[in-house]
Amino acid sequence: MSSGAIILAAGSAEGGRDLRPLICVGGRPMIRRIADTLAELPVSPVVVVTGSRQEAVQKCLSGFNARFVFNRRYASTDMLASLKLGLQALDRPGCKRVLVIPSDLPLVSVNTISLLLQADGEAVIPSYNGQRGHPIVLSAAAAAKIEGFEGEGGLREAINTLTEPLVIPVQDRAVLMDVNSRKAYNELAEYEAVMSGSAQLHLKCDFSLAVNKAVIDGDTILLLNMVDCTGSLQTASDCVGISYSKAWRQIKALERELNSTLVTSAAGGSGGGGTRLSEAAKFLVESYQNMLAYGKNVSKVMFDAFFSNEIVKKIQNQG
């Protein structure tokens, strides 16, 4: 059965400052985590509905096969309007089921989504401890009904007009973990640390490069990446969770030690304003990422050789 997916990333009417798809969790923007999860599943096509931060969202998904649809009225419309645009962009005759996921729900597992896609219902909704969550899966018939819905109440009311939804209990707390507050983000970050295996002795591979007193590590590269995606040092620092002044000092210190320009700022004009990475910075980011990918493979072989599961259990059980 052919299944497509829609990622709702149009943002909100809050002055264009809705950063949620771009906020980083575990070293990746939330929307990139969702895309990486979908890449492990048999879903195609994937439609991403953008609005606020359109260009930044597209850059964050560089290399991911998706169709992008821009909701020009994102500042005055709700999630239902974005979903309708996404449904219109799907290849409906060949798409029997549609996964719908908000862009601030980054930790739902591959297994959970696979379970939802396999369930047979007009609308399939996950629940955790009796509470309904996201993502949802719609049949082709349900998608057509929602696309034609013109009543009040938004997406929730549109779903209520369908045949009784099939609610699937799952052991995945992440179906409830959308990011709508700082507290919710902190809980999400803690959950990601546990689910990534951080509670057990494991290999955490990162490399630090040094030039005099300046250090380049994974956090530095993430900041530069987000500058490249967002075109703004202020936005990039918000996304990675540090102050603008700290980000500025960090980059300027690195520029001094490297004797090279890493970011350039431009006033508005025909080319637009904002902050951009220099060619030197792009070379730095690319080379670091290539080194990290190679280093992870080598380091895993070393870790497995010296820290087998039996040894890890002995170490952690010694108290």
Image (cartoon, rainbow, N blue to C red):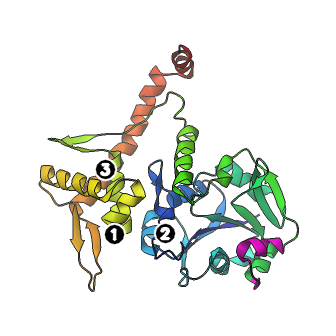
Amino acid at dot 2: Asp
Q: Earlier in the sequence, mark 3 or mark 1?
A: 3
Position above or below: 89 against 265: below
Name the outermost residue toward the right: 163
User: Residue 130: which disc?
Assistant: none
Residue wearing tag 1:
231
Estimate how packed mark 1 is, as few (under 14), some (14 to 19) or many (20 or more) residues with alpha carbons within 10 Å.
many
First in sequence: mark 2 vs mark 1: 2
Q: Which residues are magenta?
A: 148-161
Q: Check disc 1 and report its element: helix, strand or loop.
A: loop
Name the quadrant containing residue 10: bottom right
Q: Which mark is residue 220?
A: 3
- Circle 3 — which element? helix
Left of 145 or right of it: where is 295? left
How much space separates mark 2 and mark 1, taking CA atoms? Answer: 15 Å
Q: Kindly indicate whether the residue at mark 1 contacts the one at mark 3 (C-beta within 8 angstroms).
A: no
Category of crowding for the residue at label 2, using alpha-carbon neighbours closer than 10 angstroms: few (below 14), some (14–19), many (at least 20): some
Calculate the distance from the C-alpha at mark 3 to the C-alpha at mark 2: 23 Å
Q: Magenta stretch: residue 318 in it?
A: no
